[in-house]
Amino acid sequence: MYSRKRLDMGWLDVVAGFGFVVGAGLNREPQVTLEQTWSPRGQALACLSVRSGFDLLLGCQDWPEGSELVMTAITIPDMVRIVEHHGFAAIPVDVAVDSLESDIEAIERAIGPKTRAIVVAHLFGTRHEIGPIAKLARAHGLLLIEDCAQAFDGLDYRGDERADVSMFSFGTIKTATALGGALLTVRRPALLEAMAKRQADYPLQPRRKYLAKLIRCVAMMALSPAFAYGLLVASLGALGQDYDAVVRNLVRGFSGPSFIDAIRHRPCLALLSMLERRLRSPLTERRLRARAAASRELAEALGTSLQYFGERAQPHTFWLFAVVVENPEPLIQRLREAGFDATSGGSTLVATGSNGLAATLAPAASLAMAQIVYIPVYAQMSARARRRLAQVVNAQAQPLRTVQSEPMHQDNAA
C-alpha cells in the first residue's frame, strides 16, 4: 500500500540530525546564522513552531480582551485555540476551493470596531496575491499576518513585503522539514524586538524531545516504501489496532492540556542546526519540481468534472493533493482496497473559527472540508501506479457540484 505522504527528508539528513543531537558538527550560534541567512536585513525570528511564533506575536499586543482577528477559515484548530487563549476571537472568512483565495468582500464585511488583524493563509502548497488584502489592512490600520506554513518553496519567497509578519513552518510533514522549527519575517522592528525578548525568557526545548522526533522520523521513513507500509497496515489490522490513529500520532506536533506550555520553548541547538542545513540543501527545489510534476500528471488524468483544491492557483507545489467529492468514505475505501492510503483526516486542517462561526461565515470552506479526500501522490510513486490511481478515482469519485468554484471578485490594485 502506498503511504498517504512521504517525508521530505533524506537519510543523510537523519544521520546529520543524530550528529547534531550529540553535538557533532553543531553550530554553537545557529540562531544568529539561521536568522541572518533567512533575512540579511535583520527581520527574522526562529521559533519552535509557527504556533509558537503566532503565540509570541499575540502575546506582544496590547489589544483589549474581545479583540478580533479576521482569519482564513481553513486552518488548524490550534491557531484558533491560541487566539482564544489570549482573550481574542477568530472571525473566519470563506475560501474558494479552486483558487484557495480568501474572499476579499467577506474580509471587508468581517472587519468591525473590534478587528485588530487579518491573518491570510496560503493553503495546500499554493500562494496567492495578497495585494487587495494588504490595501484593506492599511486602510483600516490593521496588522497583516501571512500564514505561509504550507507554502515554503525555496528561499526566493520569504513572505510578501506588504505583510507585517510572514510565518513559515518546517514541521514534520512540511516541505524541507527540519522535524520542527519555524521562521518568521517580522517587518516591524519594535514588534520583532519585543517578540525576541519575550522568547529569550522561554525554557530551551529539551534535546531528548528532538531525539524522539528523529526516532519517529526513522520509523516513518523505513515504513514509507509500499511493501513496508502495507505490511504495517496488515499487522495493525491483525492486532485489532486502528492504523489511521497510529499514523496520525507519529506526526502529531503538540497535544494535550499543556499545549500552551509546550509551544512556549526556544528551539534547541540541534533543531536550529538541522533547519540551517535544510535551508542550504540544493535538493529542495528538485524535490519540489518532482512532487509538483507528479501531482499535475494526476490532475490532468482526472475527470474534468472532479475538483481538486487549488486547481486554478499559481504557483502550486502540491504540498497536499486533495479532491472534493460527494462520496468521500466510499472513495477512501476503494482507494485503500486498491493499495492507496487515502484519508479524509490525514491533515489537521479544518474549517474553523471562534464560536462555531465557520459554518455560517464560511459555507464553501466548511462544505469542502467536510467532503475532502486526501490523495497520496508523490514522485516516488511510479507513473504506472499514478495512472492506476487516476483510474480508481475516476471510476469511484462522484463530483460535488455545490462547492464555490468561481473566481473571487477582487480589486487588483496593490
Image: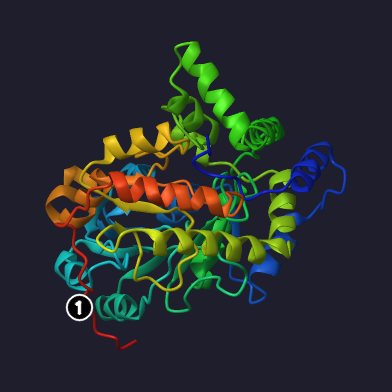
Location of the C terminus by quadrant is: bottom left
Foreground residue among 96 and 277: 96
The residue lying at 18 percent from left, 43 percent from top is: 355
Residue 32 image point, x, y percent: 72, 61
Of 118 and 155, nearer the camera is 155
The spot of residue 184 in percent (x, y) is: 54, 62
Q: Is residue 59 above or below residue 251?
A: below
Residue 304: horizontal and vertical position, in percent?
29, 64
Q: Residue at x 31, y 71 (%)?
A: 142
Could you say which quadrant of the image residue 30 lies in?
Answer: bottom right
Say above or below: 333 vs 45. Answer: above
Query: Which secondary structure lies at badge 1?
Result: loop
**39 or 215, which is in the foreground?**
215
Q: Quadrant of residue 162?
A: bottom left
| The one of 253 and 84 positioned closer to us in this rendering | 253
Q: Which residue is mark 1?
A: 409
